[in-house]
Amino acid sequence: MKVSKNGEIKPDFKRISLIYIRITRNEIRNTHKPFIMKYQLLALSLVFFFRAFAQDTQNAATIAPSKTYAQFDHIALLVRDVKKSAAFYSGLFKMDSIPVPGGGDGKVYWFALNNNFQFHLVEGIQDSGPIRFNHVAFSVPSIPEFIKQLTRRHIVYYGSKGNFSVTYRPDKVHQIYFKDPDGYEVEVNDRPH
């Protein structure tokens, strides 16, 4: 719980969400549920966390200016049936769909959550094999400057043309991907916020 300046007690959404994510991660490790269900549980807990985080930070007047270089941009999930998943998530979380740059060919749905946070669904899961493409995305002011940080840290990044390439999306946003120490895919782009 947090105590505001006027003595009002408020729930600490970020702490509650982080605890929820830890519980979900432990459940994933210690359960025999199907592989895909485990990662859908983790994805839902991440959506819950970022939605709670955005709700907690809506009153910007009480929060000091951020010195963070990056802003959170989106989470993307690879799904079997994008229309079914879109109906599920939009119905459950009351999300508004937004246009997909380049159209998405009916296999991609984007949703807006609060201010600039987005949730993406991409059709492509096969019945067997590991889930790929699920990722978290951050937006930075400059992709070339961010690439310098990756290079200094010897982190391999990639785009649509392979290692050390940058993807240029139809909406004029540059994006790259790399893996975190646990193998999760991270996207970094320069979408303005």
Image (cartoon, rainbow, N blue to C red):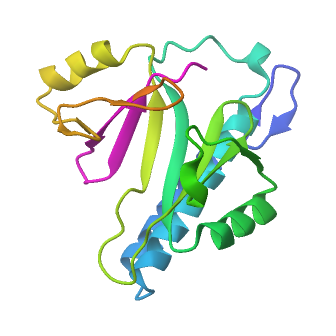
Question: Per the image, is 21 magenta?
Answer: no
Q: Which residue does the image show at 52% across and 24% down from the upper left?
A: 191
Residue range of the region highlighted in magenta in the rendering: 175-193
The answer to whether residue 17 is seen in the rendering is no
**Foreground residue, 18 or 48?**
48
Residue 33 vs residue 84: left or right?
left
Q: Can you see residue 162?
A: yes
Q: Residue 30 at what x, y percent from top left? A: 39, 80
Rendered location of residue 12, percent (x, y): 69, 41
The extreme left residue here reads 154
Q: Is residue 138 left or right of residue 106?
A: left
Residue sitting at x 65%, y 54%: 48
Q: Position of residue 18 (x, y in %)?
A: 54, 50
Q: Quadrant of the C terminus?
A: top right
Question: As displayed, is residue 151 above or below residue 109?
Answer: above
Total numbered labels placed on residues in the image: 0
Q: Is residue 40 left or right of residue 35?
A: right
Q: Residue at x 25, y 54 (%)?
A: 183
